[in-house]
Every structure is written in C-alpha cells, then in structure tokens.
C-alpha cells in the first residue's frame, strides 16, 4: 500500500464554486428565463445534498406551484435551465470570478513534481470543470491529470461510488494506493463505499466535522494548522509529505486490523 495517485474533487475542494459560482449562475438563469425563482445562500446549501445541477433543479421544482405540471415538461425545463446556467457559470469563471482555494495550486504542483499520478473525480459537468481549470491552470490544464471523471461519465452521481470505481479502473490501481481529497459528505460517502482513503478539506457549505473514518480532516490545504490527525511541523501549507504520512497511517491501521 503505497500512495501512487491523488484523486481531486472539484466543487468546494479545488475551488469554492458553489455559493458565488453555480448558485449565482442558477439565479441568473432563472431571471434570463423569466422565472421568479431565486436560491438564497441558505436554500442552496439545503439543495447541495442533491448532487448534479439538473437533479437539484428537479428536486426544487417540487416546491414551486408555478413549475410545469408534467414530468416531461419539468425535465425539459431543467435541461434548458441547466444549459443556460452552465453558460453563465463559464462566463463567470472566465472573468476570473472564482479562484482555486489557497494551497491547492502548490499541492498540485508538488504532487506532479513528486511523480504522483493525479485525476479529477467529480459529479459536476465536464464543461464546468474545463471552464474553471482552463481559467485557473492554463490552456494545458488537462495535461496535469491522467483522467477526468465527471458527472457526464457516470450513471449515478456521488454518493454513489461509481466515479471512484471508474477512476480506479482507468488508473489500474488498487483503492488503497490512492488518496482522494473531498469536502462534502456525498463525496466522502462515495470514497468510503469505493474503499478509497479520503481527506476532507472543509468548505463554506460543509464546515462541520467529517465522519471519523476519513483519513484526515482540516480547514484547508493552505495551512497545516487545525488538521486531525496533526500534519507536519510548521505553519506552511499541507504538503505531499503530510499526505504520505496520513496515507501510511491508513495502511498501518488496515494491516493491523486483520
Ligand atoms: C458538485 C455538484 C455539482 C455542482 C453543479 O460536485 O454537486 O452538481 O453543484 O455542477 P463535486 P453541475 O463536489 O463532485 O465536484 O451543474 O455541472 O451539475
């Protein structure tokens, strides 16, 4: 059991995309479509238990008396709004409105320099991942990642483990040789079901403690402070050596639990 690959979640983990990104774009799409709907910061937080933007729209429509009555018409409206939202989200990220979270870029670079394989494992749409990472990492962003498994690729989104199952198959690695970085309970649940060790970088919408079966959890990759178990010495950002130390604990615990 050696750490060979990092699997990165996107929304909330690489960047705080939800409150000031997807939510704003959804609201702009409602307005552009002439709908009087609006998702407050709080309401959007409630809706984040539903993964996938289109799925989120459909769940919310159940609360609107002015939503179309038939399932087919609702599906068509959700698809139209989602497409509109994604275009608006792209504009927003292309204007530089959403930055990578502090510490992310440094860890991406260090992991690459150390020869760790890296992949993206997300329930968001491919167009949204591409828009964000092209803006933040440059035109060659795709070369940094051996695989990008998105919401478009799976039949069932997180908390279903499919995104991780697909990633492991593509990498040809055992789950124990990887480490995922997630922020949300649905992502953590997907990892645990897939047997992928996971660390949690808490985010705006998911500030609460994660379940104890995660490998480590803390306030962000920008600082070693506040992580449980403790990261290495000093105030600097989380490094590959911290990831390796956390990962080694899992290996040790698994071997000694047998
Ligand atoms: C986050 C999600 C996504 C985004 C919106 O996924 O649940 O649905 O909120 O993206 P993850 P789409 O944390 O796995 O990156 O509108 O493209 O679905």
Image (cartoon, helix red, strand yellow):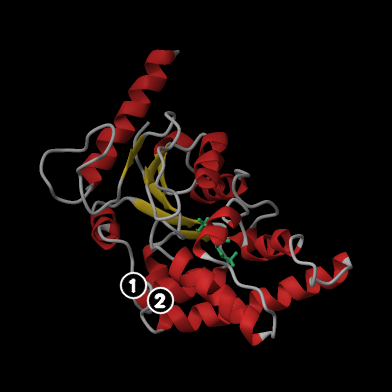
Q: CA distance from mark 1 to mark 2?
A: 5 Å
Asked if residue 164 shows in the view, the reply is: yes
Q: Residue at x 39, y 84 (%)?
A: 95
Q: Residue at x 41, y 42 (%)?
A: 208
Q: Secondary structure at mark 1?
A: helix
Q: Are marks 1 and 2 in contact (CB under 8 Å)?
A: yes
* Residue located beneath label 2 in the image: 134
Q: Residue at x 52, y 70 (%)?
A: 22
Q: Secondary structure at mark 2?
A: helix
Q: Residue furthest left?
A: 234
Q: Is residue 122 above or below residue 84?
A: above
Left or right, 138 with reference to 222 = right
Task: Determine the image quadrant of residue 3.
Answer: top left
Q: Position of residue 28 (x, y in %)?
A: 57, 81
- Dot 2 crowding, Cα within 10 Å, few <14, some 14–19, many 20+: some
Asked if residue 84 shows in the view, the reply is: no
Q: Position of residue 229 (x, y in %)?
A: 27, 31
Left or right, 113 with reference to 53 = left
């Amino acid at each position: 059991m050696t750490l060979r690959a990092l699997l990165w979640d996107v929304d909330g983990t690489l960047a705080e995309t939800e409150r000031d990104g997807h939510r704003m774009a959804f609201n702009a799409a409602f307005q552009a479509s002439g709908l009087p709907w609006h998702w407050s910061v709080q309401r959007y937080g409630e809706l984040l238990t539903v993964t996938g933007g289109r799925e989120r729209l459909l769940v919310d429509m159940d609360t609107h008396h002015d939503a179309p009555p038939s399932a087919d018409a609702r599906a068509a409206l959700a698809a139209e709004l989602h497409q509109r939202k994604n275009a608006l989200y792209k504009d927003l990220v292309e204007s530089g409105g959403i930055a990578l979270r502090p510490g992310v870029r440094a860890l991406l670079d260090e992991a690459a320099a150390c020869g760790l394989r890296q992949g993206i494992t997300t329930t968001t749409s491919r167009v949204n991942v591409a828009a964000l990472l092209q803006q933040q990492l440059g035109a060659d962003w795709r070369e940094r990642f051996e695989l990008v498994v998105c919401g478009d690729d799976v039949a069932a989104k997180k908390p279903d483990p499919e995104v991780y199952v697909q990633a492991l198959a593509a990498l040809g690695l055992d789950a124990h040789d990887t480490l995922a970085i997630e922020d949300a309970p649905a992502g953590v649940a997907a990892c645990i079901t897939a047997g992928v060790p996971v660390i949690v970088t808490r985010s705006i919408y998911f500030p609460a403690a994660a379940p104890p079966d995660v490998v480590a959890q803390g306030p962000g990759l920008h600082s070693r402070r506040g992580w449980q178990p403790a990261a290495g010495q000093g105030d600097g950002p989380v490094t590959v050596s911290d990831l390796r130390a956390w990962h080694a604990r899992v290996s040790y615990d698994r071997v000694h639990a047998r």
